[in-house]
Amino acid sequence: MNTYIGKYNKEYYCSDYDEFFNENSNLIKNVVNKFLRSKYGNVSSCDVDEVCQEIAFKIIKNGYIDKYSSEKSSLKTWMYIISRSVAIDYMRKSQIIYINVDEIDDIPVPEIPNISISIPKGLLTARQIEVLRMIFWGDLKAVEVAQQLGITARTVRCIKHQALNKLRRHFGASRERRSVS
């Protein structure tokens, strides 16, 4: 192991890491800046700073300083490879794809199957049917249903729960245990 890098061991204080990054921060920042501007063009200085922080975090977290060997490559090459890899990962994560919807000619309309459920008469009360319709077909939340019916949200959830239990018992779903993943 290189004697220069050997002193930057995780067992030492953070000041050793500070010293390492103080000595090499300009090199890292220049590599990141040149690489990002050549590959991605419009890059802000905030992006460069973010990538530099990611590099420092990755070097410390993964113990890359301990893994460095001067026999395999020079310090500059080693730091260039790490800097470039982290910069690519950062840009992939932060890449935002913009699509102008005005440019799309044919927007496919999803087919919604027409599902009709026949609930036997008398199985549910009128209030239970009304609550289920408002929640499942009206896409309303319990609070919104409660406001429209003049009852509390807790009562709405209770009515929904009772109605679903009745439907499960009637259709035989209450005997099966479902696992939620």
Image (tube, rainbow, N blue to C red):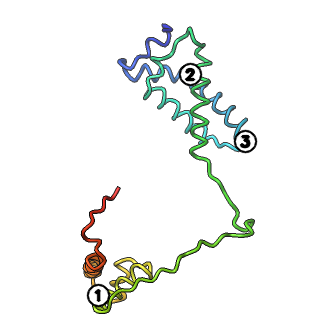
Residue 41 image label? 3
Q: CA distance from mark 2 to mark 1?
A: 73 Å
Q: CA distance from mark 1 to mark 3?
A: 63 Å
Foreground: disc 2 or disc 1: 1
Work out whether mark 1 precedes mark 3 in sequence or the reverse, and give the earlier one. Answer: 3
Question: Quadrant of residue 48 in the image?
Answer: top right
Question: In this rendering, is residue 32 above or below 7?
Answer: below
Q: Residues within 10 Å of mark 3 (few under 14, many from 20)?
A: few
Amino acid type of the residue tagged 1 in the rendering: Leu
Q: Secondary structure at mark 3?
A: loop
Front one among 155 and 8: 155
* Residue 75 on image: x %, y %: 58, 15
Whether the residues at callouts 1 and 3 have beta carbons within 8 Å, the answer is no
Residue at horizontal 49 percent and vertical 20 percent from the top: 20
Asked if residue 62 lies left or right of residue 93, the reply is left
Q: Residues within 10 Å of mark 2 (few under 14, many from 20)?
A: some
Work out whether mark 3 precedes mark 2 in sequence or the reverse, and give the earlier one. Answer: 2
Residue at horizontal 51 percent and vertical 35 percent from the top: 54
* Residue 6 on image: x %, y %: 45, 11
Amino acid type of the residue tagged 2 in the rendering: Asn
